[in-house]
Image (cartoon, helix red, strand yellow):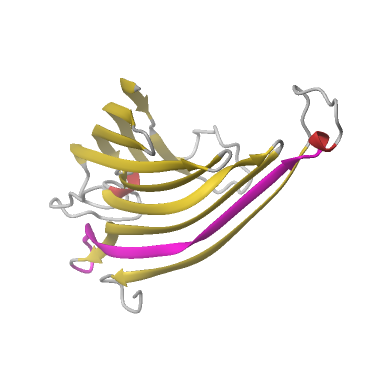
Amino acid sequence: ALTVGYTLYTSRSPYNEWNTSNPVVDKDDESGTPFYDDARKTMYGALFAENVFRFEYFHLVTSARFDHEELTTRESLAPHPLLVDETYSKNVPLFGIGIGNDFGHGNETYLNVSQGFRPLRYLDIASPFSNFSTTNNPDPTKYLTYEAGVHGWPSLGLYYDVSVFQVNVRDRIESEQLTQTETIDVNTGNTRSRGVELEGHYDLLRLFSGAASNVHLDAFANASLLDARFTSSIVPGQT
């Protein structure tokens, strides 16, 4: 079972602020003193492919994705001297692999390892609150996720899922003060999160024989145990 595709996205998100002495001014009122003006734009695209290989006792899923992001910021007015007028382009290849084994009646074990990322945000490159250095150019934050568990439908109406996971995050964006007036966003933060997740739900109408199969009333419960911490950071006391 092969899946291939693409996605394209574009948006414009102007950021404008005005100062006024009116504490209850309407959000669309532009009669105050101009304070900040930034013409912002995003272009995003991705190509992806995934395939399921089925064998006698298990199945294997492989996937690949290539993401391209362009963030444009055009500051024309700001309360700081270094106006940003740049386009930031980032390319991120991603890969994933998963394996599953069907056993018993409607049960499956699974294990997957996959990459992810958090794209750059506008405030990473331009902000009314920061006087960014001209060398400011952070990279997206990278994720590597491990998950293993078991789930299934052991009987009509009953579903369960129990898993353990760990997410390693590197290149988190943190702000560094270069001088008294200039800052820069740098990829110096790393975190690790691990835990256990449990989920279950039951279709109460399955308790009654002859209930219509297209009518459902589910009772469900979820629980998570999470241990998360910074493993490295330039922020004092963060780790």
* Residue 182 visible here: yes
The percent position of residue 135, horizontal first and vertical second, equals 13, 52
| 182 horizontally vs 220: left or right | left
Point 35% across, 38% down: residue: 37
Q: Is residue 72 left or right of residue 31?
A: left
Q: Would you place residue 178 above or below residue 128 in this image?
A: below
Residue at image x 58%, y 55%? 198
The outermost residue toward the left is 135
Q: Position of residue 199 (x, y in %)?
A: 61, 50
> What main secondary structure does the magenta stretch of the protein show?
strand
Residue 35 in sight in this render: no
Front in this rendered view, residue 98 or 24: 98
Q: In which quarter of the image is residue 174?
A: bottom left
Quarter of the picture holding the N terminus: top left
The correct choice, above or below, for 25 with respect to 193 in the image is above
Residue drawn at (35%, 49%) of the image: 128
Does the segment drawn in magenta span residue 202? yes
Q: Which of 44 and 1 is in front in this view?
A: 1
Q: Which of 42 and 82 is in front in this view?
A: 42
At 50% from the left and 34% from the top, the residue drawn is: 31
Q: Position of residue 19 (x, y in %)?
A: 47, 46
**Which span is picked out in magenta?**
179-204
Residue 86, magenta (yes or no): no
Q: Where is residue 180 in the image (x, y as percent from the top left)?
A: 22, 69
In what quadrant of the picture does the C terminus appear? Answer: bottom left
Instruction: State whether residue 224 is above or below residue 134.
Output: below
